[in-house]
Amino acid sequence: MTPQQDTDLLDDLVTLGVAFDGLRQTVRVDMERRSGRESLSEVELSVLLHLARNPGTTPTAMARDLERPTARIRRALKLLGGLDLVAEVDPAGPGYANTPAGDEVRSAGRSRAVHHLRYTLAALAPADLELLVKAQPALRKLAAALAS
């Protein structure tokens, strides 16, 4: 890769990141509305999303995975529990999972994101869509690397 290609790629990825951040904000507002709470923090939303992928996770493991203080995760769990969005998996154990209401909030947020992405993809030329499909393996690897 040439230095100019490197610069162009990084610029394009930053622009894409900003666009996805805008989409995330739209989804966040929708999730807040559906949760019955005026404002959910980034940590609270992250907890809902994390539990959707990792039901039964303990607060300590969640804090490690989300790189947040355990006390902050516990506060988020308490608040989300009060909204009936999460619950302890086993009252005797420390694991948590989304309730059906929590899953509905998260699922509705995902559906909203998919709707926006479908609308955006529909506006692209077929040749550009083919290029995106071919780039899927690299995009998955990039997403995994960014998530770790």
Image: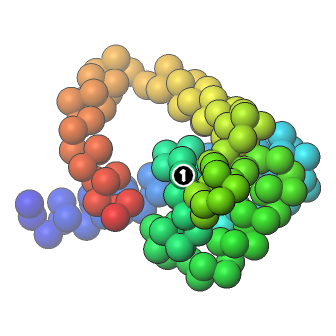
The residue singled out by tag 1 in the image is 56
Residue 27 visible? The answer is no
Which residue does the image show at 65% across and 33% down from the upper left? Answer: 107
Q: Position of residue 101 (x, y in %)?
A: 77, 37
Q: Is residue 147 left or right of residue 116?
A: left
Which residue does the image show at 75% across and 73% down from the upper left? Answer: 75
In this view, the residue in front, 77 or 131, is 77
* Placement of 136 over or under 35, stated as above or below: above
* Placement of 89 over or under 71, stated as above or below: above
Q: Quadrant of the N terminus?
A: bottom left
Q: Secondary structure at mark 1?
A: loop
Q: Is residue 27 left or right of residue 57?
A: right
Q: Position of residue 43 (x, y in %)?
A: 66, 67
* Placement of 72 over or under 44, stated as above or below: below
* Placement of 20 over or under 93, stated as above or below: above
How many numbered badges does the structure rendering display? 1
Q: Is residue 138 left or right of residue 82?
A: left
Q: Position of residue 67 (x, y in %)?
A: 49, 75
In this view, the residue in front, 102 or 60, is 60
Scheme of image coloration: rainbow
Which residue does the image show at 67% across and 37% down from the upper left? Answer: 103
Residue 146 visible? The answer is yes
Q: Quadrant of residue 128?
A: top left
Label 1 crowd (10 A; few <14 / some 14-19 / many >=20): some
Q: Quadrant of residue 15?
A: bottom left
Which residue does the image show at 54% across and 47% down from the upper left? Answer: 55
Q: Position of residue 21 (x, y in %)?
A: 58, 56
